[in-house]
Image (cartoon, rainbow, N blue to C red):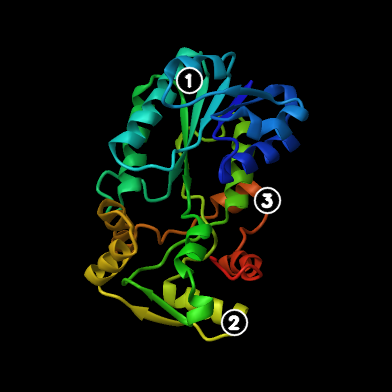
Amino acid sequence: MIIVTGATGQLGRQIVERLLVRVPADRVGVSVRDPRKAQAFADQGVRVRHGSFDEAAGLAHAFEGASQVLIVSVDRMGEEAVRLHRTAIDAAVAAGARRILYTSHMGAAASSHFQACRDHAATERALSASGVPFTALRNGFHAAAAVQFLGHAADSGRLELPEDGPVSWTAHADLAEAAAAVLADEGRFDGPTPPLTAAQALTFDDVARLATDIMGRTVTRTTTPDGRFHDQLTGKGVPTEVAGQLLGVFAAARAGEFAAVDPALADLIGREPTPLSTVLREQSGTGAGH
């Protein structure tokens, strides 16, 4: 049985949907915090069980009988994120899984400027120490984040962000399809995968030009000093720690941590990855980030 965690989240849900195209529903189980939100999967014959990375005992039930467990990384940063991931890894080992898979990041490195990438690197080290074969899916930076950073630029015509660098913005749908392909072909990758990215790395200058073309209104990219951006965020009620973490994205981009492009994703999904322009076009009907 293949177990997928976080199956009601944006990425996990799409992974399960694409996995069900490849394997019978009775071979798929999901571990979710609220089983009611996974009723649509239960109706298709998927085994739905409650599981939280905060509760090791509950994960033992959720992971029961697993041949593979896909751990979808949590939406938190720092020591808490790594602790939760370790709990899930330990539960997968205890359940007897033959392989543990994890949604990592193309920038995973202990020296990264971005906290989340340091967390991914720490989780990969825990996977390596687990004694069980593992696959770390080195996912490209989510294209949905570029849409969020665009914010209200469609209305204001201004994209005001710190200095950045090229980023391989990658669609959730493509990453989900790749994860399903790897789960259905057990052992296709051992250890970290190559970067699973779109075919092009773009700066926010490029994003502004794309937004201008798609939205029919000029979007001008202006560079905001890091300190001012931090103060703007905290002035809007963003916690200081979170503001610092967001700045880490730009520092990492400036250092080239998200610039790699690789054909591995296209090979996995059997087509060219979705370009950021398509993601922006899909979002433009709702105001791109509103």
Marks 2 and 1, how far apart at CA: 47 Å
Residue 139 falls left or right of residue 8: left
Query: What's the amino acid at mark 3?
Result: Gly
Displayed quadrant of residue 223: bottom left
Label 1 Cα crowd, 10 Å radius (few <14 / some 14-19 / many 20+): many
Q: Secondary structure at mark 3?
A: loop
Give the residue number, with chain letter if any, for mark 3. Answer: 270
Query: What's the amino acid at mark 2?
Result: Asp
> Whole-percent x and y of residue 216?
61, 84
Q: Nearer the viewer, mark 3 or mark 1?
A: 1
The residue under the point 58% across, 39% down is 12
Residue projecting furthest to the left: 227
Residue 226 falls left or right of residue 85: left
> Whole-percent x and y of residue 211?
55, 77
Marks 2 and 3, how far apart at CA: 28 Å
Q: Would you place residue 50 above or below residue 289 in this image?
A: above
The residue under the point 50% across, 61% down is 169
Q: Which mark is residue 224?
A: none
Q: Are marks 3 and 1 in contact (CB under 8 Å)?
A: no
Give the residue number, with chain letter if any, for mark 2. Answer: 213
Label 3 Cα crowd, 10 Å radius (few <14 / some 14-19 / many 20+): few
For the N terminus, the quadrant is: top right
Q: Nearer the viewer, residue 146 or 290?
A: 290
Q: Would you place residue 116 above or below residue 230 in this image?
A: above
> Whole-percent x and y of residue 180?
63, 38
Can I make out residue 255 in this image?
no
Give the residue number, with chain letter if any, for mark 1. Answer: 92
The residue under the point 70% across, 31% down is 39
The residue under the point 31% across, 72% down is 163
Query: What's the amino acid at mark 1?
Result: Ala
